[in-house]
Image (tube, grey):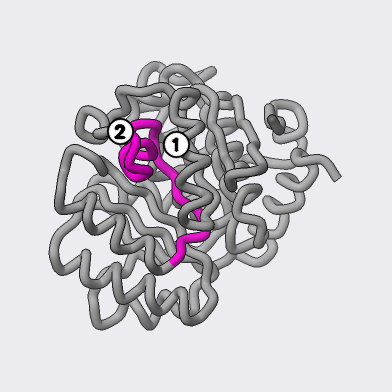
Amino acid sequence: MTLIERACETLTTIRDSSPLVHNMTNVVVANTTANALLALGASPAMVDAPLEAPQLASVAGALVINLGTITPAQAEAMKLACEAAQQADVPWILDPVAVGPLTYRSNLARELLAFKPAVIRGNASEIMALAGLGTGGKGVDSTDSSETALDSAKSLAKETGAAVAVSGPTDYITDGTRTVTVKNGHDMMPAVTGLGCTATALIGAALAATKDPVEAAAFGLLYLGVAGEVAAKGAAGPASLQTDIINQLYHLNTKLIRERGNMGEL
């Protein structure tokens, strides 16, 4: 079965099973993230209280950890949730937003790696910084290309045992040996805040439906990229693009994936 066919199969599984995806994310993107997951067919939960997060993480289909607007209380809840997920064999995804230039979140990200994420997704600068091979980007924005971060991604994957996804015009997903590329999306998408965070959440839905971390990461990026391409055709600008990406995730189907999906292996 080809990667595209497995992406179609995984989308069908998400729609049939509506997996619970526990999101501990940032305040900028929480609404968009929840709506994107609902549109794709998953069931989002946005719980980050320290007394509740580990309980929910232990029964979720996947846990998504996003460091975008981190607070000390949320950081503590994340540690507890990741530990609970690890103990319950629930796969979890780390999005190391702005790691590198900011010390507190950089230290937290490295501490969370001890709980063995299944997937790490970030932009090129974040992945290079987390791998110890760069200093990070300009705030949440990357100053490096996804291609230049591929060696760092492979190194980080081998170090952590996670599949590492680097977002960019071409997305690279690697476990250190196998590398998948996704070349879907639109030039307007970087003008919408939080679409990387949305991609991480969609990876969570895919990871709950397929236990292959490399493929789950690739499929989440593929779903968002295809939805973004279709949405951009009628978008007047970033605001309408953001709204219509949610619509196109809702209307995403296997026919569109087969027609537009652009995945390969290096």
> Can you say whether 196 is above or below 49 in the image?
above
In the image shown, does 149 or 252 lie closer to the viewer?
149
Quadrant (top left/top right/bottom left/bottom right) for the C terminus: top right
Give the residue pinned by disc 2.
134
Query: Relative to the observer, which residue lies in front, 206 or 176?
Result: 176
* Residue 50 point in image, percent of width and height: 23, 77
Q: Tell which circle, 1 or 2, labels the residue nearer the N-terminal end.
A: 2
Identify whether 26 is placed above or below 195. below
Percent across and percent down for residue 59 are 49, 79
In the shown orientation, is residue 21 left or right of residue 265? left
Q: Residue at x 35, y 73 (%)?
A: 81
Q: Nearer the viewer, residue 221 or 76?
A: 76
Distance of label 1 from label 2 (alpha carbons): 9 Å
Q: Tell me which corner region of the image, top left, top right, bottom left or bottom right, holds residue 255.
A: top right
Q: Which residues are magenta?
A: 116-133
Residue at numbered disc 1: 152
